[in-house]
Amino acid sequence: MITVAGGIIQKDDKILIAQRHRDDTHGLKWEFPGGTL
């Protein structure tokens, strides 16, 4: 079993998300920014 954690940054009814670069895998998709587990 692998235990992981996640979180979302929210301020003033806004949520931090990022759009992937068009040339990346899954280009132009939206994601929550973060690091590698």
Image (cartoon, rainbow, N blue to C red):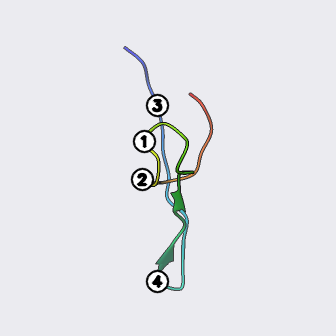
Which residue is the extreme one toward the bottom?
12
Residue 17 pos. (x, y %): 51, 62
Q: CA distance from mark 1 to mark 3?
A: 23 Å
Q: Residues within 10 Å of mark 4 (few under 14, many from 20)?
A: few
Q: Residues within 10 Å of mark 2 (few under 14, many from 20)?
A: few
**Residue annotated with mark 1:** 26
Q: Secondary structure at mark 3?
A: loop
Q: Which mark is residue 4?
A: 3
**Residue annotated with mark 4:** 13
The kind of residue on which mark 3 rests is: Val
Quadrant assignment for the N terminus: top left
The kind of residue on which mark 2 rests is: Lys
Q: CA distance from mark 4 to mark 2?
A: 22 Å
* Marks 1, 3: nearer the viewer: 1
Which residue is the extreme one toward the top?
1
- Residue drawn 44% across the image and 25% down it: 3
The kind of residue on which mark 1 rests is: His
- The reply to whether discs 4 and 2 touch (Cβ–Cβ < 8 Å) is no
Question: Measured along the vertical axis of the image, is residue 37 above or below residue 16?
Answer: above
Question: Measured along the vertical axis of the image, is residue 37 above or below residue 33?
Answer: above
- The reply to whether discs 1 and 2 touch (Cβ–Cβ < 8 Å) is yes
- Residue drawn 55% across the image and 43% down it: 23
Q: Which mark is residue 29?
A: 2
Q: CA distance from mark 1 to mark 4?
A: 27 Å
